[in-house]
Image: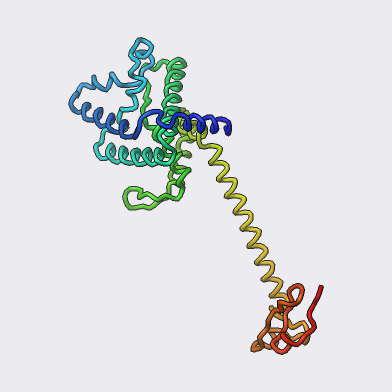
């Protein structure tokens, strides 16, 4: 996985302008055109020429390898507008973070996985038109965004604040449930593409977080242990000369001598009147 990451980084370094600049704008405009045409062409003929169909692709209609990305996920105007805005925001943010080349490679990888899944499904079943569109490709972007900015907050249903990491976990659980129940294996495209490109950094972040939590837990345990020892001892400060403590004499001031070797406490009467510890 690390060798793959290095190969992608080298390619992006040599070809920083690979792909389309502002790729998500291309996807959004294509979806809008298809959405509008679907209302003009009530027969559905226009969209039928854009659907992913291995049968027709193998007979020369190769544009279907791309045009299925422009099929809207919903024909409801409100849902369509919200989803396009959300995916454009995620995609453009990722492109700004990764750069044009890496983002195009990430998106293209999800497209290739979708096409492979479509042909495998076609040859293992009797389905001519497959319900393959850009939904799970966009969900792969969503998982990457959630991994980079897990604490980014969105308003679910416009009034429930929820962090991206929880949305991603919920979607991943639903995807796995659909696959276990045999409804569809298509969600594997989103999950697999995310793991290919973001698996190593994501796992490393979790590992570092776990180690950080372990160190914090050890530190907290040490603090609690020291507090228990002080409580059992019954005092915090004790004069090395006279033996008086802050518990017995709460109004007495205690200091640590900087000239003594080690940490040695003295009361105000002996801080300047004692034999210094040398070892």
Image point (39%, 34%), residue name: 138
Q: Tell me: residue 153, above or below residue 249.
A: above
Foreground residue, 49 or 128? 49
Q: Which residue lies furthest to the top in this view?
A: 59
Image point (70%, 74%), residue name: 230
Its colouring scheme is: rainbow
How many marks can you see?
A: 0
Image point (72%, 86%), residue name: 272
Query: In x, y percent, where is residue 229?
Result: 71, 72
Query: In x, y percent, where is residue 91?
Result: 38, 38
Query: In x, y percent, where is residue 124?
Result: 47, 16
Foreground residue, 176 or 99? 99
| Residue 69 picture quarter | top left
Foreground residue, 189 or 242? 242
Image point (61%, 58%), residue name: 216
Q: Residue furthest left?
A: 40
On screen, residue 175 versus residue 221, left or right, reads left
Work out which quarter of the rendered image holds the C terminus and state it.
bottom right
**Residue 68, can we see it?**
yes
**Residue 183, can we see it?**
no
Q: Tell me: residue 173, above or below residue 214.
A: above
| Residue 276 picture quarter | bottom right
On screen, residue 35 versus residue 16, left or right, reads left
Work out which quarter of the rendered image holds the N terminus and state it.
top right
On screen, residue 247 versus residue 130, left or right, reads right
On screen, residue 50 versus residue 145, left or right, reads left
Query: In x, y percent, where is residue 210?
Result: 60, 49
Q: Tell me: residue 229, above or below residue 61.
A: below
């Amino acid at each position: 996985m690390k060798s793959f990451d290095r190969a992608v980084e080298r390619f992006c370094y040599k070809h920083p302008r690979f792909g389309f600049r502002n790729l998500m704008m291309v996807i959004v405009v294509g979806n809008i055109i298809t959405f509008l045409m679907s209302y003009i062409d009530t027969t559905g003929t226009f969209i039928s020429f854009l659907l992913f169909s291995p049968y027709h692709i193998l007979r020369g209609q190769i544009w279907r390898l791309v045009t299925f990305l422009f099929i809207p996920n919903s024909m409801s105007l409100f849902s369509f507008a919200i989803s396009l805005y959300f995916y454009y925001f995620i995609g453009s943010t990722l492109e700004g973070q990764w750069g044009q080349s890496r983002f195009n490679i990430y998106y293209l990888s999800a497209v290739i996985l979708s096409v492979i899944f479509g042909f495998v499904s076609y040859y293992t079943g009797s389905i001519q038109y497959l319900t393959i569109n850009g939904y799970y490709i966009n969900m792969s972007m969503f998982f990457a965004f959630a991994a980079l900015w897990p604490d980014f907050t969105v308003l679910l249903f416009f009034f429930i604040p929820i962090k991206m990491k929880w949305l991603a976990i919920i979607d991943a659980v639903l995807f796995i449930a659909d696959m276990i129940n045999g409804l569809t294996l298509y969600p594997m495209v989103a999950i697999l593409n995310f793991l290919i490109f973001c698996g190593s950094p994501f796992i490393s972040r979790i590992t570092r977080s776990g180690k950080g939590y372990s160190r914090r837990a050890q530190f907290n345990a040490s603090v609690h242990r020291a507090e228990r020892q002080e409580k059992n001892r019954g005092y915090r400060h004790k004069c090395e000369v006279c033996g008086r403590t802050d518990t017995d004499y709460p109004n007495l001031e205690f200091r640590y001598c900087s000239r003594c070797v080690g940490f040695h406490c003295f009361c105000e009467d002996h801080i300047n009147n004692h034999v210094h510890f040398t070892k």
